[in-house]
Image (spheres, rainbow, N blue to C red):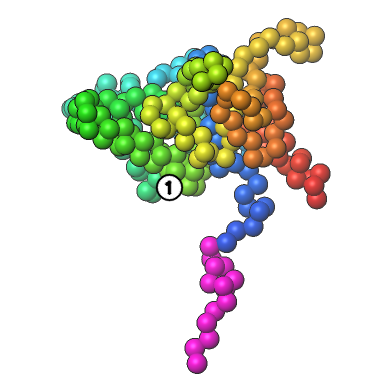
Amino acid sequence: MTEIPSLKARLSKYTTKPSQAKHPEFLLFYSQPGSGKTHLAATVSELDSVKSVLIIDTEGSTTGTLSTFDDKKIDIVDVRKTVDQIDGDVTYIQFLDSILTDLFKNGSEYDAVILDTLDVAQDWKIEERQKVNGTKGDAAFATWREVAKWTEWVGRGFKALNAISIAVMHDREEKSESGALVKRLRLGGSSKDTFAGIPDVVAYLTRKVYSIDGEEREVTIAEFASQDGKATKNRFGFPATMIDPSIKKMWHHIDNRKKENN
């Protein structure tokens, strides 16, 4: 009689241990323009384990922002500039999709990949699908279904990527039924309500003036705590707010909590 392997044996090649998932795989930062999203994302290059970073720039966000970072570690693909220099009829979204498809299919040769910004990329996808489907009646519904599917494909692709993945986007201020202001992701359709469920960490960024070492400085504040009116996710136990955040600070916080709990 053939012996049936145990469930543990059958699943052994698929299982992992908690220690193998001690750091976030996919992070999302969102805010109003000028709040430090691009700079915070680029601090991933300061991790000792990260030797190379790819930044996919959809709106020129990196221009003048990353001058203090190590040139040897960071490669920037400015989608607009690149496409404008390509001979032939290639759109921004076609070029971006070609990069993402290659990344998701073949894996990343980079230790970290940043998409800055996702909402601009989604605008391109909306425009592309509207040109194909039209903008009225059932055609409009078809467009939004396709855009929602594409946006989830981007999120799931980054979540599964063999690199630290970071998406950056703007916020959209809306009023709830009670009249309270709500800071939603600047995404169209159902994506604004569902996309935040994909990343491991979602933080809302603001800029404030603080006294640091006796000097008044304007710094970025990362808000991680769950709160009404903002899409946040804090699976890794970060403080409610982090002043002048960096990826390195976030990783140190996780490692220190692990030491305290052992």
Q: Give yes or no for residue 95 being in the magenta stretch.
A: no
> What is the secondary structure assignment of the residue under circle 1?
loop
Which residue does the image show at 22% across and 33% down from the upper left? Answer: 138
* Residue 80 in which image quadrant: top left
Which residue does the image show at 40% across and 45% down from the upper left? Answer: 104
Residue 25, given in percent of the width and then of the height, sits at 55, 42
Looking at this view, is 229 or 172 the one in front? Answer: 229
- Magenta highlight range: 1-14
* Residue 58 in which image quadrant: top left
Kindly give the residue lying farthest to the bottom in the view shown. 1
Residue 211, given in percent of the width and then of the height, sits at 76, 10
Which amino acid type corresponds to the residue marked 1 in the rendered image?
A: Gly
Which residue does the image show at 63% across and 18% down from the upper left? Answer: 220
Say if residue 69 shows up in the picture: no
Q: Is residue 232 left or right of residue 105?
A: right
Tell me the residue that label 1 is attached to: 107
Residue 161, given in percent of the width and then of the height, sits at 47, 45
Residue 130, above or below 113: above
Residue 181, above or below 125: above
Looking at this view, is 7 or 159 the one in front? Answer: 7
